[in-house]
Amino acid sequence: MLLTSSLLTRAAMGMGEPPSGLPAWRDGMAVGEWKAISGTALSSVAPSPTPPGSTGPSSKVDAWTSFVADPRTSEVYSACNGGHGDYAGNEVDRIQLAQDAPAWSQIRAPSATGDVVANVAYYSDGRPSARHTYYGVVLCTQLEEIQIFGGNLYGATGILSDDVAAFDLTTNDYKADGTRPDMPAGTTTLEAHPTVQDPSTGDVYILSNEMVNKWTRSANTWSTVIAQYGGPYGFKSMSAFDTTRNRIFLLGGDANQARLFTLSGNAMSTPTLSGSNASIDSQDGAGMVYVPDMDKYLVRLAGSGGTVYQVDAETFSVSEFTTTDGGSIPAASSGPYNKFLYLPLLSGCVYVPSYSGNVWFVRTH
């Protein structure tokens, strides 16, 4: 059943079956093995001149940011990361992990310093402000664009945006302000809101502030599907889309909660975690993915080392996923958020814990 589900998921994403060949760095890895991919530090493509900000381009990783992956190509992107007082650069960087010797490249340079404007959603050149992206980044294969939902804009005052920015993967440039409608009122009351895409439709759900709001791709409109007290709090909660059961799992955050949102009927429920690591619901700012071939959610916390947790998607039993060779993985200074990403064609997860160190990868099945 799980193999069938995995193939259906790949079909929904416009993907074929996994390739028979693997890139040189990935070949021969055992299940559970971590590997640092040589020559893959994001610092290798630091922009020059350096855009404004108190901590510079390291903020693309070290601030409260997320990356995003294309499941069809195993490409990973950093888009518009930075924000608040840390960094004004809105460049887009990409690494192609299907290559034998992957390396970062800058596919869109940052806005010129003269175009940077503090505390606004878009700079004077029409490109979006850098921001703490938190969990708010997805890649829409149906539209060939990266979408950035809200975030904490560049500038000293720390403005939370309701803007939705879009980066066109066919032109390697940002689309105009207003291409995607702003998020509904109340969505941005809390930053770090779970932002989850249904890969089969491209629709996006934001679970925050006791509401569930939905952006429908086909209509390019927002709707509120749950607006009631007792819904998901969502602040700093990790989340993932279960493509086997067509539902969203939300875990942890400041409210120490576990929630299930089932798309059929827009139903919210509360699963009970069990097992030796059930206290994982007390974590915030962590990264979580759903792996169809395992039928498990995998969770990466902020600390150093190779520990990964697994949550059974049917029973919600939580245990440690056995790994090796991850002892030298550094801690993520502001939390992993979505810098821990599943790459189905490589049967594993990529992790970017630091700006100056290599990208890491763990084989999952």
Image (cartoon, rainbow, N blue to C red):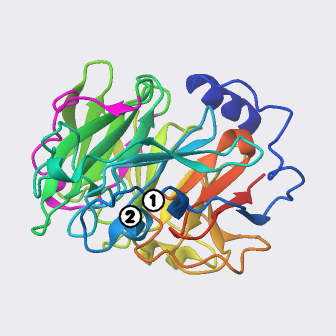
Q: Secondary structure at mark 1?
A: loop
Query: In the image, what residue type sits under mark 1?
Result: Ala
**Which residue sits at x=22%, y=43%?**
128
Task: Tell me: 75 left or right of 138.
Answer: right
Residue, x 19% and y 33% (percent of image)? 223
Which residue type carries mark 2? Answer: Pro
Residue picked out by circle 1: 46
Give the residue pinned by disc 2: 57
**Horizontal and vertical percent position of residue 59:** 37, 67
Is 143 positioned to the left or the right of 233 in the image?
A: right
Residue sitting at the far top: 218
Which one is in front, 125 or 342? Answer: 125
Query: Of the residues under marks 2 and 1, which one precedes in the sequence?
Result: 1
Position of the N terminus, as image quadrant, is: top right
Residue 32 x/y as whole percent: 78, 63
Q: Seen from this angle, which residue lies furthest front?
A: 49
Residue 85 is marked as: none
Image quarter of residue 262: top left
Magenta segment main secondary structure = loop
Judged from the image, the secondary structure of the residue bearing numbered disc 2 is helix
Viewer can see residue 64: no
What residue is shown at x 59% (from left), y 70% (from top)?
357
Membership of 12 in magenta stretch: no
Q: Which residues are magenta?
A: 172-198
Q: Image check: 38 left or right of 109?
A: right
